[in-house]
């Protein structure tokens, strides 16, 4: 049996290990706060830190199990691609608003996720919502489906194009922070389940 001193040492060292294991999630909360406000300043970082502390202390949720893997190259690819998509979509949405001769079509699109992971699904939902032109309406955790309201779609080809773009965001996120098993899942050629999207055209 372990001695009392050993047990005490393990008990005192456990909070430190838990903090280090959850540190990436804590940093992500701060980054998410800055993204939501669209400000990358010291003040935004400080307020994000305060919000992250309040959220993690007031709402005692179960600890999030992170993969423990971070690919810096794919993380950089995700960040660069994300900002490029934000700029491109902003210009596209602005043109759709100003083009009075043709109203953009809208649709509610169901996008099936390939990975069965709450954190990955949350990352995909936040990414899709931050890109102008789309917004997550509902997340079906049991069936692993995200329902998004999208503008600028008129045909079935447009729907499939948007659905494929969200699946590519999932692939990029998994490559950056997912487990090796999840990477293998998203790298397979197996097509995701198909869903019928409901929409309206103007």
Image (spheres, rainbow, N blue to C red):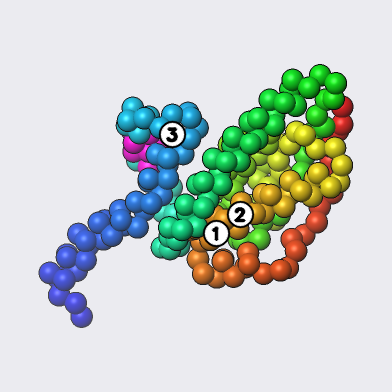
Q: Secondary structure at mark 3?
A: helix
Residue located 38% across and 45% down the image: 27
Residues at marks 2 and 1, CA–CA distance in whole angstroms: 6 Å
Q: Which mark is residue 170?
A: 2
Q: Around disc 3, counting alpha carbons within 10 Å, would you say few (fewer than 14), some (14 to 19), or many (20 or more)? A: many
Residue that numbered label 3 is attached to:
34
Residue at (19, 69) in percent of width and height: 7
Q: Is residue 184 above or below residue 48?
A: below
Instruction: Give the left or right position of residue 32, taking residue 144 as reference.
Output: left
Q: Residue 121 or 43: which is nearer the viewer?
A: 43
Residue tagged by mark 1?
A: 174
Q: Report the magenta residues as a range.
A: 47-56
Q: Is residue 41 above or below residue 119?
A: above
Crowding near pointer 1: few (<14 within 10 Å), some, many (20+)?
many
Quarter of image, res 56: top left
Foreground pick, 108 / 10: 108
Residue 24 in the image: x percent, y percent? 38, 51
């Amino acid at each position: 049996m372990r001695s009392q001193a050993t047990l005490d040492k393990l008990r005192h060292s456990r909070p430190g290990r838990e903090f280090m294991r959850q540190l990436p999630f804590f940093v992500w909360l701060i980054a998410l706060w800055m993204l939501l406000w669209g400000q990358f300043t010291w003040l935004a970082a400080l307020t994000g830190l305060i919000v992250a502390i309040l959220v993690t202390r007031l709402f005692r949720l179960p600890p999030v199990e992170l993969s423990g893997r971070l690919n810096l190259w794919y993380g950089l690819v995700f960040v660069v691609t994300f900002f490029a998509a934000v700029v491109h979509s902003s210009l596209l949405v602005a043109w759709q608003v100003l083009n009075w001769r043709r109203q953009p079509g809208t649709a509610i699109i169901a996008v099936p996720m390939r990975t069965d992971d709450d954190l990955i699904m949350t990352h995909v939902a936040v990414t899709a919502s931050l890109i102008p032109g789309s917004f997550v309406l509902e997340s079906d955790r049991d069936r692993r489906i995200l329902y998004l309201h999208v503008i600028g779609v008129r045909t079935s080809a447009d729907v499939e194009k948007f659905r494929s773009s969200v699946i590519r965001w999932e692939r990029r996120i998994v490559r950056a922070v997912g487990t090796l098993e999840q990477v293998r899942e998203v790298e397979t050629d197996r097509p995701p389940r198909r869903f019928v999207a409901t929409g309206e055209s103007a």
